[in-house]
């Protein structure tokens, strides 16, 4: 990076909020994805940590003038390569903009800066009896800006929806450096195109989000948790469909396959039958009077469809114990092989058994281990590939398998990514989903907003 | 030997770069740069192993920015041993680049040779005279020379007499029910002799005979975590020999860092020495924190009087995440009649001391410490109990800076106060005293 640019950036953010040392920049060549940066070619020129919208705008203006690529970054926990440095670029980290600006209990909204940690917003609003439901598993450390840019979701998605369903307004800096306000503080708003929704999930390619207005809902009074064990994964999937067809809407419906069950049991000793084909972890929430009735109905459906074991938590501690199984899933399988790759194909709920089947076939074909864990309620399957990245021959097979899983997903009427985004990891597959026309329209939108292609180049549309 | 940095390849690839450590790393909380969180450190080490990076000054600086607090380790979904990786990197640095001048002086000359250390500490020539000078307020010691450490770092004054010289090698009690060896550690021996005295008084009153082997050394952790393995090994072996000679039921520590070192790390350090590794394991199996031993003593609560004070507790990193001692000190504090125990928020977050970290990065360690002081302050407690002298010194320093009158002491001292309030005659000293002078 040219010295004068660094000088100017330093004037904007202050010299303490700017990094140029090799060792610092080396740490922006990765995120939580498996996209590999070539350190010699991809090392960033500078990393800056602005503290307000004005600074962001100045940085972007400078970058646009000088045609320097900018990679916006929150906590760097995305799993699609969206924050990896791309050569002599500016890494724009929003973590210092971390204030909750407003929690408005009367209008049920919150206004936050992009660097606020999602879990922090959640505990703040819950303190006054409100609820911000989107719950990516990374909620304790990922940022609101990153969540909006990826349209993150989690187990509660089945009942409460995902980030997109809560964002009602944004302040953002466009690639030209101008500041735009979209949406607003009202739930109803049809003034012009819905830019808020366009920017939500835009993966840092259209704008830098500097302020987020989200709607909140009242915190459900109580929760009830149960676990059902099935000998066949198909039975578990049928159960999911049946529960939803009956009009019951649990707030979580998590599915674990046999590989997960065996490893969790070995690791955490929670009393799962290791020969079981699948486990469903089900949680309902709402008024305490109706919970028992709901759980009762779900219990009945589970046993009708062949559950071999059902456990309903009677206390908070018991519920916690059931969730412990789910939460230790990751640590449990990570003991098996050193490298874990989590994919996130999503299929229509009814296709879950078929999708699991296809995944198992593909795993067998390439002789690799793929475990399946899913937010079964919304068809979001996390195919977890357990491998060893130092074994190049195996990694080549893994890559082929991943390609096939993507194609199978789309064939089953599903989506390439439920919540993890396209980033740099899946950009070559985007047309199998959007089609050529779809891609072209998106390209034109990008071109209109970012004529110099400075914002996160390579993400979504490929290099 | 396979303890080269390369041998850690298997450990570094276990980091899946999930970023969960951002939520718990105290250094990252202050600095926010990706290179200062566990994930960044692991990546940098990986970079050196794969030869992307060299052992540059930048790398050395990043490696020095770790408190070895293990917060990331217990929180990591893959259980990556980040502190061990940083230690391995520091060892590589020490091997290839040598230690910095101050570290050289302290590690090689002073800590290793008990007699130099003792003589130096006693006469005040080496430590207080040569390296440190008195602070302007006349209490603390400020480093004298520019040795790559922050000059403002206040150290507590050294004790008049080292702890070990105040007691016979065996502190006997009539009809002892148990005999233990006390590993004092440096800070109790040279600075906080009041903690050592409390340990002995409390154990004696419970019928425990205490052996204080005079030939014991520093545990070696300060040199090991800074990469000087050869010195660390020499010290470990000396301690192993000294303690295995004693016929005792347990080896008691009053510091989590020393404890972890004796209990687990000696065996790791000496893993290539077939003779000593077994001895290290044997010693390890005998190690108990003071609070662990106390709660196992029947009737330890019976001797307490009332202490109408509000107390809070800070978990030392190596005590809670190393020795896994969490409930025992709380159980002791709660069992004292009259004490109101108020848990602070984030009691188990590092106080920012991190051994020599606070010497090298004083400013930063002060910022980390401010959060701790704030948590202590919010509880409204009059006494902060903890289980480590380094934490005690660092938090005391922070409280002083903010003019906060909270008293900081080891859990053993609080218990000693409770026993004195119970007016039980102490079997060793201060027989009929009201006990106050025993405390200051
Ligand atoms: C262990 C683990 C579990 C996960 N679980 C889930 C899950 O359950 N559900 C889920 O949806 N995801 C999950 N993720 C993925 C990831 O956490 C989410 O994508 C999250 O939203 C990323 O947030 P971040 O702050 O880390 O953003 P980053 O990774 O830093 O950035 C993500 C993208 O957003 C862009 N960006 C960031 N901030 C801004 C901004 N202010 N303005 C414009 N663009 C911006 C970046 O350029 C990048 O393209 C998980 C990840 C991990 C490691
Ligand atoms: S929590 Fe562990 S696995 Fe995750 S990034 Fe940190 S060190 Fe790596
Ligand atoms: S040991 Fe402590 S300071 Fe070091 S990386 Fe882990 S959490 Fe951070």
Image (cartoon, coloured by chain):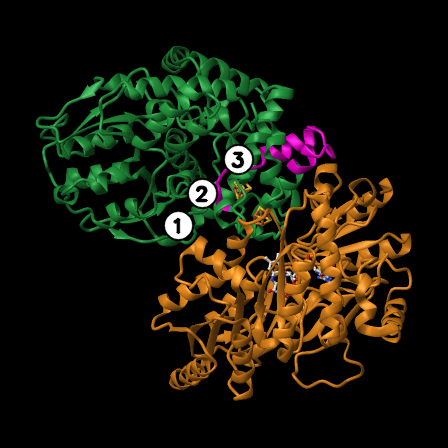
Which mark, residue B73?
none
CA gap between label 2 and label 1 equals: 10 Å
Task: Report which residue position mark 2 lands on.
Answer: B402
| A272 versus B211 height, above or below | below
| A83 versus B261 height, above or below | below
Question: Which dot, 3 or 2, sits closer to the camera?
Answer: 3
Q: In the displayed structure, does residue B330 sit left or right of residue A22?
A: left
Quadrant housing the N terminus of chain B: top right
Residues at discs 2 and 1 in contact (Cβ within 8 Å): yes
Give the magenta range.
Answer: B45-71
CA gap between label 1 and label 3 equals: 33 Å
Q: Quick one: label 2, few (<14), some, or many (20+) residues within 10 Å? A: few
Residue A239 in percent (x, y) is at: 52, 80
Residue B118 in percent (x, y) is at: 37, 14
Q: Which element type, helix, strand or loop, lies under badge 2?
A: loop
Task: Report which residue position mark 1 lands on.
Answer: B377
CA gap between label 3 and label 2 equals: 34 Å
Q: Quick one: label 1, few (<14), some, or many (20+) residues within 10 Å? A: some
Task: Decide which of tag 3 and tag 2 comes sooner along the chain.
Answer: 3
Drawn colour of chain A? orange
B336 part of magenta stretch: no
Task: Report which residue position mark 3 lands on.
Answer: B84
Q: In the displayed structure, does residue A60 sit left or right of residue B16?
A: right
Residue A198 sits in quarter: bottom right
Q: Which element type, helix, strand or loop, lies under badge 1?
A: helix
Query: Which residue is found at the position 80% from the left and 81% from the top?
Result: A193
Q: Quick one: label 3, few (<14), some, or many (20+) residues within 10 Å? A: some
Q: In the displayed structure, does residue B167 sit left or right of residue B356?
A: left
Task: Output the chain of dot 1.
Answer: B
Task: Output the chain of dot 3.
Answer: B
Drawn colour of chain B? green
Q: Nearer the viewer, residue A278 or A214?
A: A278
């Amino acid at each position: 990076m040219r010295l004068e640019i660094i000088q100017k950036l330093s004037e904007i953010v202050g010299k303490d909020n700017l990094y140029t040392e090799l060792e610092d920049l080396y740490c922006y060549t990765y995120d939580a994805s498996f996209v590999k940066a070539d350190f010699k070619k991809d090392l960033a020129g500078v990393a800056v940590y602005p503290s307000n919208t004005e600074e962001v705008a100045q940085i972007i203006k400078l970058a646009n003038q000088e045609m320097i690529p900018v990679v916006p970054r929150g906590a760097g926990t995305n799993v699609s390569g969206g924050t990896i440095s791309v050569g002599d670029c500016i890494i724009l980290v929003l973590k210092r903009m971390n204030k909750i600006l407003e929690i408005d209990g009367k209008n049920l909204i919150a206004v936050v800066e992009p660097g606020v940690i999602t879990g922090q917003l959640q505990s703040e609003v819950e303190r006054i009896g409100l609820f911000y439901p989107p719950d990516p598993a990374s909620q304790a450390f990922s940022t609101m800006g990153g969540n909006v840019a990826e349209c993150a979701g989690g187990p509660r998605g089945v009942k409460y929806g995902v980030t997109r369903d809560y964002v009602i307004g944004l302040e953002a800096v466009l690639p030209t450096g101008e500041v735009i306000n979209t949406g607003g503080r009202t739930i109803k708003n049809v003034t012009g195109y819905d830019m808020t929704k366009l920017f939500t999930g835009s993966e840092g390619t259209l704008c830098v989000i500097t302020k987020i207005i989200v709607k909140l809902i009242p915190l459900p009074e109580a929760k009830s948790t149960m676990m059902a064990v099935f000998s066949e994964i198909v039975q578990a999937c049928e159960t999911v469909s049946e529960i939803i067809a009956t009009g019951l809407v649990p707030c979580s419906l998590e599915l674990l396959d046999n590989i997960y069950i065996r490893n969790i049991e070995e690791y955490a000793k929670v009393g799962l039958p290791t020969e079981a084909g699948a486990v469903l972890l089900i949680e309902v929430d709402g008024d305490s009077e109706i919970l028992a009735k709901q759980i009762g109905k779900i219990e009945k459906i589970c046993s009708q469809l062949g559950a071999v074991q059902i456990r309903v938590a009677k206390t908070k501690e018991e519920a916690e114990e059931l969730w412990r199984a789910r939460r230790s899933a990751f640590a449990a399988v990570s003991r098996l092989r050193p490298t874990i790759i989590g994919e996130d194909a999503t299929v229509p709920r009814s296709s879950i058994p078929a999708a699991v089947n296809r995944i198992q076939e593909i795993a067998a074909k390439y002789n690799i281990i793929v475990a399946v864990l899913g937010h079964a309620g919304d068809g979001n399957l996390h195919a977890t590939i357990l491998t060893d990245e130092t074994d190049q021959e195996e990694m080549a097979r893994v890559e082929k398998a991943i390609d096939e899983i993507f194609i199978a997903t789309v064939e089953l009427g599903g989506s390439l990514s439920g919540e993890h985004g396209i980033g740099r990891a899946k950009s070559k597959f985007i047309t199998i989903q959007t089609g050529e026309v779809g891609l072209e329209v998106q390209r034109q939108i990008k071109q209109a907003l970012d004529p110099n292609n400075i914002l996160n180049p390579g993400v979504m549309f490929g290099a | 030997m396979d303890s080269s940095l390369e041998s850690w390849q298997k450990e570094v690839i276990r980091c899946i770069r999930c970023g969960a450590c951002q939520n718990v790393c105290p250094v990252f909380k202050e600095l926010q740069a990706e290179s200062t969180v566990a994930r960044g450190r692991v990546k940098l080490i990986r970079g050196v192993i794969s030869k992307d990076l060299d052992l540059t000054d930048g790398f050395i600086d990043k490696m020095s920015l770790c408190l070895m607090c293990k917060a990331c380790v217990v929180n990591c979904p893959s259980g990556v041993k980040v502190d061990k990786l940083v230690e391995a990197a520091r060892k590589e640095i020490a091997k290839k680049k040598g230690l910095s001048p101050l570290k050289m002086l302290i590690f090689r000359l002073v800590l290793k040779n008990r007699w130099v250390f003792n003589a130096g500490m006693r006469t005040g020539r080496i430590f207080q005279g040569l390296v440190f000078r008195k602070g302007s307020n006349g209490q603390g010691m400020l480093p004298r020379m520019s040795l790559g450490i922050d000059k403002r770092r206040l150290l507590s004054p050294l004790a008049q007499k080292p702890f070990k010289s105040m007691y016979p090698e065996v502190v006997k009690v009539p009809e002892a029910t148990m005999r233990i060896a006390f590993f004092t550690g440096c800070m109790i021996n040279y600075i906080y002799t009041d903690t050592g005295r409390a340990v002995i008084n409390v154990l004696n009153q419970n019928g425990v005979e205490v052996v204080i082997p005079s030939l014991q050394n520093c545990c070696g952790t300060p040199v090991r975590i800074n990469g000087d393995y050869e010195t660390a090994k020499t010290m470990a072996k000396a301690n192993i020999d000294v303690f295995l000679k004693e016929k005792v039921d347990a080896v008691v520590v009053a510091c989590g860092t020393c404890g972890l070192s004796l209990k687990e790390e000696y065996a790791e350090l000496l893993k290539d020495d077939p003779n000593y590794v077994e001895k290290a394991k044997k010693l390890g199996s005998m190690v108990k924190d003071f609070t662990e031993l106390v709660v196992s003593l029947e009737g330890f609560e019976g001797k307490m009087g009332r202490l109408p004070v509000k107390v809070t507790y800070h978990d030392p990193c190596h005590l809670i995440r190393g020795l896994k001692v969490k409930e025992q000190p709380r159980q002791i504090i709660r069992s004292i009649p009259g004490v109101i125990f108020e848990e602070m928020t984030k009691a188990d977050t590092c106080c920012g001391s991190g051994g020599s970290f606070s010497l090298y990065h004083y400013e930063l360690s002060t910022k980390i410490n401010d959060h701790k002081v704030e948590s202590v302050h919010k509880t409204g407690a009059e006494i902060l109990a903890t289980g480590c002298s380094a934490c005690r010194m660092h938090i005391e320093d922070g409280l002083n800076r903010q003019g906060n009158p909270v008293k900081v002491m080891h859990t053993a001292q609080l218990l000693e106060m409770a026993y004195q309030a119970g007016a039980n005659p102490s079997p060793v000293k201060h027989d009929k005293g009201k006990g106050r002078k025993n405390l200051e």
